[in-house]
Amino acid sequence: MPVSLVTGLLLVVAACDSRPGAEAPGTVGSTDAAVAAVPAAGRPNAGIASTGRSKDATAPAAASSGPAPWTMPAVPAAVAEGIRVYRTNYCGTCHRDTLAGTAGIFGPDHDSLRVNAARRIHDPGYTGHATTPEAYVRESIRDPGAYRAPGFEHTRFMMPAFTQLSDAEVDALVRMLLWQPSPQGGP
């Protein structure tokens, strides 16, 4: 099979997780303004309620072997707006983000971005101009060529500059991307 055909198929499959209205079960919808809990998409035991029984009363509860799976905390309305902007602009085609329920593989993972942004701006190899995690995320959206995240320096799938986004949309993305807690224990 030609490489271009395989690449195209991968892009179509990746886009399925991030098209508007294609939401992972239990995630905040683009019209939700209220605070809601957002479970991690694709997480084992995501359908198990606190009673130990599955949501489907006829299915037996899954056996637990270890600590309870990590659960995303409640999402404020301002963060839900960032999720809407993220999904509307197909960020999940390339980026994995538990909060937005996306599983992209062509760009850096957005989970734990607050921790990663702080680490990157203090790295001697950092080529951007940001001095805070907030400025780093803004720079990454508006001028992604300022710095290529480790492991993605030479990818053929370079991120475009999202200059068409309004300042309010960029602010919403920054809030969402830096708010989300890390399944690995970060902020």
Image: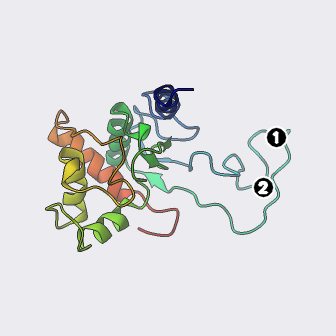
Residue 141 locus on image (x, y percent): 24, 46
153 above or below 10?
below
Q: Residue at x 29, y 52 (%)?
A: 175
Q: How much space separates mark 1 and mark 2, taking CA atoms?
A: 11 Å
Q: Quadrant of the N terminus?
A: top right
Q: Nearer the viewer, residue 14 or 164?
A: 14
Q: Residue at x 43, y 44 (%)?
A: 106
Lateral position of residue 71 relative to residue 105, left or right:
right
Q: Quadrant of the C terminus?
A: bottom left
Q: Residue furthest front?
A: 2
147 above or below 55?
below
Quarter of the image where one finds residue 156: top left
Lateral position of residue 132 relative to residue 33, left or right:
left
Count the numbered circles shown: 2
Under circle 2, the secondary element is loop
Lateral position of residue 106 relative to residue 166, left or right:
right
Q: Answer yes or no: do the residues labelled 1 and 2 have beta carbons within 8 Å?
A: no
Marking on residue 57: 1
Task: Bin the neighbour count of mark 2 within 10 Å (Cα to Cα): few under 14, some 14-19, many 20 and up.
Answer: some
Residue 178 locus on image (x, y percent): 33, 58
Q: Nearer the viewer, residue 29 or 108?
A: 108
Question: What's the residue type where badge 1 is placed?
Answer: Ala
Under circle 1, the secondary element is loop
Question: What's the residue type where badge 2 is placed?
Answer: Gly
Q: Nearer the viewer, residue 47 or 14?
A: 14
Residue 56 locus on image (x, y percent): 78, 38
Q: Residue at x 18, y 63 (%)?
A: 127
For label 2, the residue is 52
Residue 71 locus on image (x, y percent): 57, 57
Q: Residue at x 57, y 41 (%)?
A: 26
57 above or below 130?
above
Of the residues under marks 1 and 2, which one precedes in the sequence? Answer: 2
